[in-house]
Image (cartoon, rainbow, N blue to C red):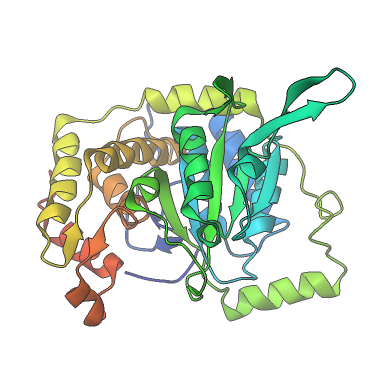
Amino acid sequence: MSNQASSFTDGSHGYQGGHVREDAGRHEPSPSVEPDPARKALLDVRHEVGKAVVGQDSTVTGLLIALLCGGHVLLEGVPGVAKTLLVRALSTALSLDTKRVQFTPDLMPGDVTGSLVYDSHTSEFTFREGPVFTNIMLADEINRTPPKTQASLLEAMEERQVSVDGVSRALPSPFIVAATQNPVEYEGTYPLPEAQLDRFLLKLSMPLPGRAEEIEVVRRHSEGFDPRNLKAAGVRPVAGVVELEEARRSVAQVTVAPEVLGYIVDVVRATRAAPSFQLGVSPRGATALLNTSRAWAWLSGRNFVTPDDVKALSLPCLRHRVGLRPEAQMDGVHVDDVLGSILASVPVPR
């Protein structure tokens, strides 16, 4: 599996969790698929985000897939690889609202969901919305806050609502959580429990840029690029809620052959029998792999799912839903390597 980042170009490369695999999924758009304005608008989003963020096209594609599926994303990368800037640029290009929350050990659940505030003028309690009332919520370093505050997001992530004082309040649509983790610093952190990890549709890796990409980053800054001023960088809205809803309806029409459904189930079941895993993928993971494969197929210009689509989304969709055995961890086994072996061993339908 290649770790080299590359551009996502209409299905001509395989998507691998924030990385692009050059040898996967070389598909031509099906001649039966008419040009889709919603698809063109969403693909144009990558160009707009590229005006602010260099070398993360495949991560942008992962976020688009999450929006198409109505799922949440766990972004993993060291500080300084433009996680916050990417989410802000994506929201601008899609005309969506975004809010950022820095998760800290003293963050309370009400700081995220909102709380009742006493109004001295009316002598009544009124609800003050928290930052979760947005379209894309950036939960920065989510593993730095205690489990109680982490759990406050579960209802929002699963039910798209917040309950305070017995009253349920619906969140805006669309709504997804983009949570970040630092993969190298674990001191003072609270690892996310399996139940919450399973609520994330994808886990995307944001690598450090290559030399040429890093030169481009520095060049832009030397010419006056200000990451706090996306308008000056030329990032403009090219799609919105209307296009996103139309795209979701189109994705729902993508067909999946019985043989491909069986392949998805076989891949998931193989994770439960893998000797290196003490925890395999649940049925929720199987449905997530189905939905993301359909979204990828639609973005690639096809109205059907192929086994290559399933392979392309298997790592980002499954890597956070499995758990290595302690002895495998001591031997330096990596989750992605085990999943790669499973994909190589499960028979592919013809």
Which residue corresponds to the image point at 62% horizontal and 60% vertical from the top-left? 104
Q: Nearer the viewer, residue 233 or 187?
A: 187
Where, by quadrant of the figure, is residue 115 drawn? top right
Considering the image in quadrants, where does the C terminus appear?
A: top left
Q: Nearer the viewer, residue 33 or 194?
A: 194
Tell me if residue 278 can be seen.
yes
Is 159 above or below relative to 234? above
Horizontal side of 46 relative to 34 (left or right) equals: right
How far from the left and from the top, in percent, is residue 71?
45, 38
Residue at image point 22% right, 44% down: 282
- 170 or 4, which lies in front? 170
Give the number of callouts. Answer: 0
Camera-side residue of 257 and 142 = 142
74 left or right of 271 in image = right
Residue 64 to residue 258: above or below: below
Where is residue 99? Give x, y as percent. 69, 44
| Vertical comparison of 258 with 277: above or below | above
Q: Residue at x 52, y 37 (%)?
A: 67
User: Residue 201 location in percent, x, y?
Assistant: 40, 44
Counting from the top left corner in percent of width and height, residue 235 is at: 77, 48
Q: Is residue 346 above or below residue 177?
A: below
Position of the N terminus by quadrant: bottom left
Residue at 12% of width from left, 44% of height from top?
349
Q: Is residue 26 visible in the rendered structure shown here?
A: no
